[in-house]
Image: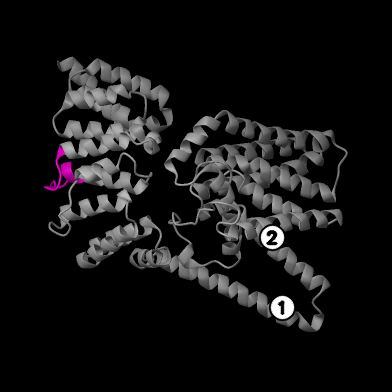
Amino acid sequence: MVLLSSAAVLGALICLVYSWRALLEDSVVRGFWLLVASAGLAVLGLLAKETAALLLVYALCIYYFLNEFERPASFVWRRLVPWVLWVGIAAFIVVVFIGWDRLIDDYLIREFTLVERLLSQPRALLDYALQTVIPKPASLGLFHDDFAISHSVFDPLSTFWAICFWFIALLAAIYARTKGVALPLVLLCWYLGGHSVEASALALELYFEHRNYLPSLAVWVAIVALSVWLWRDYIQPNRRKVFVFIAAAYAAVILAISVTTNILWGDPARLAYLYSEERSGSIRARALKIDLYQQVGEVDRAFSELIRLEEDFRGELAPQLLAVEFDCFYEGRFNRGLTEDVVDAAKSARYSNGALAAVESLIELEFKGNGCDNFSEKDLIDLVDSFGENPKYKRKYAMLHGFAARISWESGSLDQALARLLEHKGGSFQNDQMLVVLLATMHRYQEAVDLIKVMRSVYPFEVELQADYFDKLEAEIKLDIEVN
């Protein structure tokens, strides 16, 4: 979805630039339709990913760059275009501040604070740029939960150097602008502006390469511009062959790295091993390695890796739950169940998507698999309720109540499942969908039909994606009403 959003934004920018050009040439009709096309692509980008709103930032960078070469007297160009872009950016900032309380609540599920995240981003942005210039295949992946948190300007020291780098880069770009060279400042604004949402106060993970798709264009344009500048003004004709050789060698290295990365992504087992070795501090990377070992039947290696994972991350709940799940498949390896210590630990454990995934796996194993003798249905309910008491899982309470309702339902306690779902009715699409089926199962048909109508208005997009399912479900319920 990020790639789709980036492609849509890039298409919207191209249409927007040609629209400006057409309007300045008095081609009003052509300019209007290009503007409509740009708006349509922008909407597509927003539907794919909210960060498509950065289209306004990119457009502003392009506007000021074009303005260096040509300053038409048109009121639209001189006043209307920049004001529309600035007002759009201001509106986006206002929306962020309106949702500030919820934004701060999101940090409950993170192991870092707002200040620590902001301090960590200069290092992340510098690393994105370096990875663009000299990518490292082992670092291009899905797992970056081991990215070091900046606790202060000097902890780690690389935080200080990264801040210095961006400050010096900004001063150099401003100085170049005073000398009549606008491109460095435009590219810097493009790069930093392109990261201004996901590198700001939002409680996202500290690092993820897909955020760099469009901002990385600034890095490549800078490389090309620097090469042209050196070729034109500094490299003597008799040395240009050496320059061409170096450029070709660099292109070959980038191509080789791209091919290597593509091969790695086509081999999940090798990729998992590489990630777990390169990112030994990532629970997710090492959990994937354990899972792949199990899939290929190398149980002993999976067991050894899981032992090391528990030792390296003492106090973390996800490895303990993975061990419980592992013991369900291979009895006697750990003799581990959902003990009182594990259940109590869920009340104060730090947030972990891996822990929630492990809970869901245990539920699937208990009711869709062959069951497990290491824990009971009551143990599962107690575990889910303990997570529910943990404030760090506040944003996942709807999911947890859905887990508890499903356990009660599968155990035959329909009234308990119904009470759970009714208590949080309207809290999530998945829970309301489960509630519809449960109400129909309990012959409360009219309530089920009424809830489907409510869901069509509250979750129009989700219901539309499953239109056939809901139409069939509604038809079956109405048929049952007639029969009964």
Please give the name of the residue rendered at 48% of the width and 63% of the height, measured from the top-left corner: 139
Instruction: Identify the image quadrant of residue 250.
Output: bottom right
Please give the name of the residue rendered at 77% of the width and 82% of the height, measured from the top-left corner: 239
Please give the name of the residue rendered at 41% of the width and 60% of the height, measured from the top-left corner: 281
Q: How many marks?
A: 2
Q: Position of residue 481 (x, y in %)?
A: 20, 16
Looking at the image, residue 429 sits to the left or right of residue 63; the answer is: left
Neighbours of disc 2 within 10 Å: few (<14), some (14-19), many (20+): some
Within the magenta stretch, is there residue 369?
yes
Q: Amino acid at mark 2?
A: Val
Please give the name of the residue rendered at 51% of the width and 38% of the height, measured from the top-left corner: 47
Q: Nearer the viewer, residue 19 or 226?
A: 226
Q: Position of residue 208 (x, y in %)?
A: 50, 53
Q: Which residue is labeled 1 in the image? A: 243
Q: Position of residue 158 (x, y in %)?
A: 59, 61
Q: Which residue is labeled 2 in the image? A: 221
Does residue 330 sit above or below 433 in this rendering?
Answer: below
Q: Which residues are magenta?
A: 365-377
Q: Position of residue 379 (x, y in %)?
A: 18, 39
Callout 2 secondary element: helix
Q: Label 1 near label 2: C-beta < 8 Å?
A: no
Q: Amino acid at mark 1?
A: Phe
Neighbours of disc 1 within 10 Å: few (<14), some (14-19), many (20+): some
